[in-house]
Image (spheres, rainbow, N blue to C red):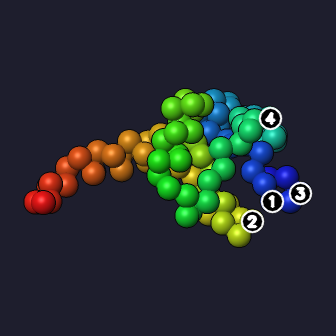
Amino acid sequence: MDFDGYPLGVVSLEALLAIPADRRQDTKVGVLVVSQRPPRVLSPDDDAVLLLERISRDGVLPAVVVEGGRVAGMVTDEALSRTLQQALLKPATPV
């Protein structure tokens, strides 16, 4: 986050796991950040189509969800995949 509370990047679980156990205590978060320029920032009120358009354009997740100047959550590729799979499992509603 910058001084205005705007997300500057993310730290992945893979980056954390790549740090040898004996170096974790001395490793600063700043060296682990994957910069996002421009950051993929969404509002909770944004339409899912906007997220899909950004993915098709940028090809990368996660997207940071910001509400009221604070991080409210993140959309990861795993979460999006799971949501889409669950949607496919729902029975079709008759018209």
Give the amino acid type for the residue marked by disc 2 in the picture. Answer: Gly
In terms of secondary structure, where does tag 4 sit? helix
Mark 4 nearby-residue class (10 Å; few <14, some 14–19, many ≥20): few
Q: Is residue 27 above or below residue 2?
A: above
Regarding mark 3 in the picture, which secondary structure is present there? loop
* Residue projecting furthest to the bottom: 68
Q: Which residue is mark 4?
A: 31
Q: Is residue 62 visible?
A: yes
**Residue type at mark 4?**
Val
- The CA distance from mark 4 to mark 1 is 19 Å
Question: Which residue lies at the image location 38% right of the left edge and 42% below the top edge?
Answer: 81
Label 2 to label 3, Cα distance in Å? 11 Å
Residue picked out by circle 3? 3
Q: Position of residue 73 (x, y in %)?
A: 58, 58
- Give the residue at mark 1: 5
Tell me the CA gap for discs 4 and 3. 18 Å
Quick one: SS at disc 2? Answer: loop
Q: Earlier in the sequence, mark 4 or mark 2?
A: 4
Of the numbered discs 4 and 1, the one sitting upstream in the chain is 1
Q: Are marks 1 and 2 in contact (CB under 8 Å)?
A: yes
Helix or strand or loop: what does disc 1 sit on?
Answer: loop
CA neighbours of label 2 inside 10 A, class few (<14), some (14 to 19), many (20+): few
Q: Quadrant of residue 92?
A: bottom left
Q: Nearer the viewer, mark 2 or mark 3?
A: 2
Q: Tell me, yes or no, whether the two marked residues, 2 and 3, touch with CB atoms within 8 Å.
A: no
Q: Is residue 71 above or below residue 64?
A: below
Q: Is residue 73 visible?
A: no
Q: Is residue 35 left or right of residue 85?
A: right
